[in-house]
Amino acid sequence: MVSRLVPAAFPVCILTLVLSCFQVFAQDGLPASPSRGAPAVLDEPPGVDTAPGEEIPGSPVLHSGTAPGVQPAHVTGNQAAPEPADSVTPPLASPGSAPHDETFESGQDFTRPVRRIEAAASHRDLAGDAWVETLTLRASLPVPLPGGWTLSLRAEQPYSAIKGASRNNPLGKRVNGFGEFLGEALAVMPPRGRWTYAMGALWIPPSASHDELGTGRHQLAPSLGVRYDLGHWMPGAWCGLMLRHAVDVAGYSGFDHISQSVAQPMLNIDLPGAWFVTFAPEARYDWKNSEWFVPFDMTAGRVIGRHTVVSLSYRSAVNDDMMLYVNTFEARAGYIF
């Protein structure tokens, strides 16, 4: 067991500089986009006078363009009023669920961060009979910035138990302890049409309580993400891409240097009953060893009562030159507040 005091001053200074740059960019006067989910405007047909509380015959309750089934009325002078449309009562949703045509927050979208705390338990099969079991605590916080920008902050701390020989544990010792802390800051731009962009960085210090549970190096990973709204195809659906490049900037001697590129395509589909399915495989390329890692990644979950999110994830290596894992199973429970 190796005890360490993490020399975090250098990466903290770098992150402070990055966040300061985001603050400067946020003050460049970009116009704020209309907020999602803004209430529709109550509209009255021209030329119709009503008393307080009186319903307007034939007028739609919520106005957002031409209502389905409403045809232009006959014109009298310079005035026109819509003809009545058939009244349709929407079906009631089951308790604890959201209707399919109503957007719900699952926390999967990196461009729409939510205040959330989360616990995840995972089992990871490695080559041979080795395995890793991990309990991870996560927290995320969105911070509004001027100009419609948002600063998304995320932190996670794992606690792992490993058994069997692996690349990080060549002697096959059974070890348990804290893994490396992860911190992330992303600056999310206001949406531009269906597109939303984000940029920031990951920071992973050499904070593991054992050599076998970490890399021993300070890692910085500049990040760039893009999201495209597929709501015109299916409500709540979106796709995206996150690109990162991780490098080590300092650390303990005797540990390998790090230079890895990461590409993570994403596809999220919201389903009836507040269920959702997300595909987000995180492919890696190690420039130092010329090795690939390409996984399959699928998450299925449900939002319960609008504040609780539960999900199950399955990941399987398609190409594992880097010997990261063979299969991973993860259960998560989070609370959005």
Image (cartoon, grey):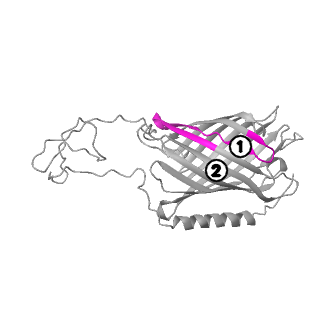
308 vs 256, left or right, is left
Q: Which mark is residue 138?
A: 2
Give the answer, above or below, for where 39 lies relative to 92.
below
Earlier sequence position, callout 1 versus callout 2: 2
The reply to whether discs 1 and 2 touch (Cβ–Cβ < 8 Å) is no
Q: Is residue 196 magenta?
A: no
SS of the residue at dot 1?
strand
307 vs 246, left or right, is left
The image shows residue 101 at horizontal and vertical percentages of: 40, 39
What range of the chain is rendered magenta? 264-292
275 vs 316, left or right, is left
Asked if residue 145 shows in the view, the reply is yes
Instruction: Residue type at mark 1: give it.
Output: Arg
Q: Which mark is residue 284?
A: 1
Give the answer, above or below, for where 108 lies relative to 320.
below
Instruction: Residue type at mark 2: give it.
Output: Arg
Identify the residue shown where x is 20% and y is 51%.
53
Asked if residue 206 shows in the view, the reply is no
Q: Nearer the viewer, residue 9 or 264?
A: 264
SS of the residue at dot 2?
strand
The image shows residue 42 at horizontal and vertical percentages of: 27, 51
The overriding secondary structure of the stretch rendered in magenta is strand
The image shows residue 237 at horizontal and vertical percentages of: 49, 40
